[in-house]
Image (cartoon, rainbow, N blue to C red):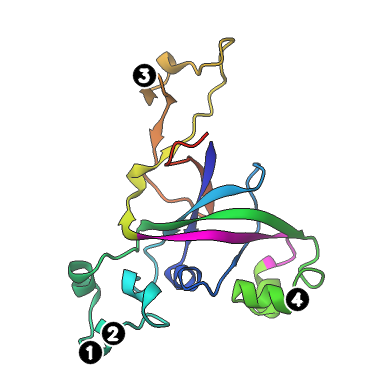
Amino acid sequence: MKSVMLSINPFWCQKIGSGLKTIEVRKTRPRIDTPFKCYIYCTKKGRPLVWGDVFRGGEFVTEFVQTHGYSKENAERIWDVFNGSVCGEFICDRIECSADPAGGLVDVVTEKQSCMSAKEIIQYADGDLLYFWHISQLKIYDSPIGLQSFMLPCNEELDKEGFPPCEKCEYSVQFYGCKKTLLRPPQSWCYVDDADGDE
């Protein structure tokens, strides 16, 4: 079953993890039906995001920071840092589209759920379509997961028996089709095989 890997800035990861952000605003959407699973890749760009940031306190403030303070190096030794790793997952249960970001779906509820003002949403759209991915069944991991734990789905054409031509593929894994480890995060999002192996 295809899932999606989303690259998200640490600031927005914290908003999602704290439950404040329940809509992810994007200019594109995957060509799969909802509901589908989304994995949250916390980008390296931005301040270090540690487990405590999500569950104790607000904007990158934790009990540890308040009493001791920490640098990125200290945080990496003391707590797991999510930057550059997959920090959680959610189910995208529906996607709404706005053909005109200046009106229609950009209302007070959308602003609150996306943690963005109407002005910010309209500026981000820059005249393009916008897709509002609804976040449900959020799960933040106890420790970060590396990208190498995820596989890109096989895009090869199936043969008449329904199997991919694995003997032609350098990423062949016997009996499981063509697999390629995800080594680089997507710019926005990409398809990945469901890590749970659900069908």
Q: Which residue is mark 2?
A: 63
Q: Are marks 2 and 1 in contact (CB under 8 Å)?
A: yes
Residue type of the residue flagged with mark 3 = Gln
Say which residue appears at 49% left-offset and 70% top-offset. Answer: 12
Marks 1 and 4, how far apart in space?
40 Å
* First to last magenta residue range: 125-141
Q: Which residue is mark 1?
A: 67
- Rendered location of residue 55, percent (x, y): 38, 74
SS class, disc 1: helix
* Quadrant of residue 123 within the rendered picture: bottom right
State yes or no: residue 197 in magenta. Answer: no
- Rendered location of residue 88, percent (x, y): 42, 58
Residue type of the residue flagged with mark 2 = Glu
Between 98 and 22, the residue placed more toward the observer is 22
Looking at the image, residue 78 lies above or below residue 158: below
Residue type of the residue flagged with mark 1 = Thr
Q: Earlier in the sequence, mark 2 or mark 3?
A: 2
Report the side of 183 relative to 78 (left or right): right
